[in-house]
């Protein structure tokens, strides 16, 4: 039982070869592309949705921050589509792996921070001391702010990993419980099944929200530093 | 949080002119001074001579 629970999170191999690169690249294949300015209905719908997210997300940024638009849009679409595809049965979700989330979080956070220190050194350094701090608290607060800065990429990665992994694990457990209870007591199995349905709806929401939160936080770190 | 404050709206004198938690320069100097202090502490503990206890002849 224990082995069954966690095998869905192991990196997939096909005849001994790792196919994780293919799995990460797969969601991109689902989005149609076109060379034309005005294309078909599905492309128009896709463009409309992306523009909606783009305008909402990049409205607060300066022109320098807006150079990151493509990066942030790709990020949110990748995380959202990967998370949603992971809700299908027997699929592997790359965002359950801490390695992948760290690989997304650390370079993006580091890029934003280095940008801030390179172009706006005074403002970036003064972020470590909130305005109006009492004198006696200054050293302690600076140390706390430094620690919180370095925790940001870890928190980004672990938040996404934990949320998606926990959701998948719960669905697995409650599904197994429903199946086990079916032969024992049908009414209890029905209640468990309803819980499973509600959880699945929650997981849909969580998949999209986590993508949004990840991208929003990266955008916030960028805003602080541009 | 208010927008970026202008350093000119605060008039401090003496050491407060360079180390305060209101102006951008003041905050930067406080942060750099704290980091410098921590670096000096670390350096002091690394470089101080280690006292070896005297061996007692039995």
Image (cartoon, coloured by chain):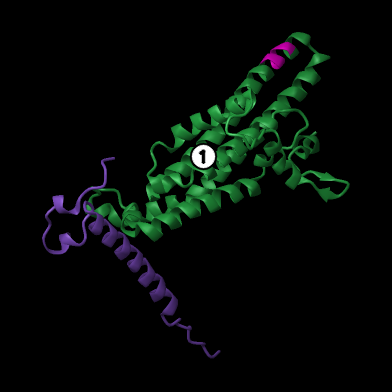
Residue A166 sits in quarter = top right
Percent of width and height locating residue A185: 78, 11
Percent of width and height locating residue A107: 54, 53
In the image, B20: left or right of B41? left
Q: How many marks?
A: 1
Q: Residue at x 42, y 46 (%)?
A: A65
Residue A44 sits in quarter = top right
Percent of width and height locating residue A90: 78, 31
Secondary structure of the residue carrying tag 1 is helix
Tell me what hue chain A is rendered in.
green
Percent of width and height locating residue A109: 49, 50
In the image, A1: left or right of A201? right
Q: Residue furthest right?
A: A15
Q: Residue at x 86, y 49 (%)?
A: A16
Figure check: A42 above or below A31: above
Figure check: B50 above or below A204: below
Pick the front one: A122 or B20: A122
The residue tagged 1 is: A215
**Please, which chain is the residue tagged with disc 1 on?**
A
Figure check: B11 above or below A59: below
Q: Magenta residues, as a range?
A: A190-194
In the image, A22: left or right of B57? right
In the image, A184: left or right of A198? right
Figure check: B47 above or below A36: below
Q: Within 10 Å of the Cα at label 1, are there few (<14), some (14-19), or many (20+) other Cα atoms?
A: many
Q: Quadrant of the N terminus of chain A?
A: top right
The chain that appears purple in the image is B
- Residue A191 magenta: yes
Q: Residue at x 73, y 40 (%)?
A: A9
- Residue B39 magenta: no
């Amino acid at each position: 039982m224990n082995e069954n629970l966690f095998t869905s999170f192991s990196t997939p191999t096909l005849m001994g070869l790792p196919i994780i690169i293919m799995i990460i690249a797969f969601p991109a294949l689902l989005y149609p592309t076109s060379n034309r300015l005005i294309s078909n209905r599905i492309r128009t719908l896709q463009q409309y949705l992306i523009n909606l997210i783009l305008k909402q997300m990049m409205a607060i940024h300066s022109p320098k921050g807006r150079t990151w638009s493509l990066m942030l849009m790709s990020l949110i679409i990748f995380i959202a589509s990967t998370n949603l595809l992971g809700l299908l049965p027997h699929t592997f979700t790359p965002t359950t792996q801490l390695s992948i989330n760290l690989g997304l979080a650390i370079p993006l956070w580091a890029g934003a921070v280095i940008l801030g220190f390179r172009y706006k050194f005074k403002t970036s350094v003064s972020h470590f001391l909130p305005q109006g701090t009492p004198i006696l608290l200054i050293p302690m607060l600076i140390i706390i702010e430094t620690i919180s800065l370095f925790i940001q990429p870890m928190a980004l990665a672990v938040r996404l990993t934990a949320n998606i992994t926990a959701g998948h694990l719960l669905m697995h457990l409650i599904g197994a419980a429903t199946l086990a209870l079916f032969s024992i007591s049908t009414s209890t199995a029905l209640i468990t099944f309803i819980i499973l349905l509600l959880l699945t709806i929650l997981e849909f929401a969580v998949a999209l929200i986590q993508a949004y939160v990840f991208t929003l936080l990266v955008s916030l770190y960028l805003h602080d530093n541009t | 949080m208010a927008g970026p404050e202008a350093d000119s709206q605060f008039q401090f004198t003496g050491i407060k002119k360079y180390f305060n938690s209101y102006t951008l320069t003041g905050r930067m100097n406080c942060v750099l001074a704290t980091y410098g202090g921590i670096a000096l502490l670390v350096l002091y503990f690394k470089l101080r001579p280690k006292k070896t206890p005297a061996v007692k002849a039995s």
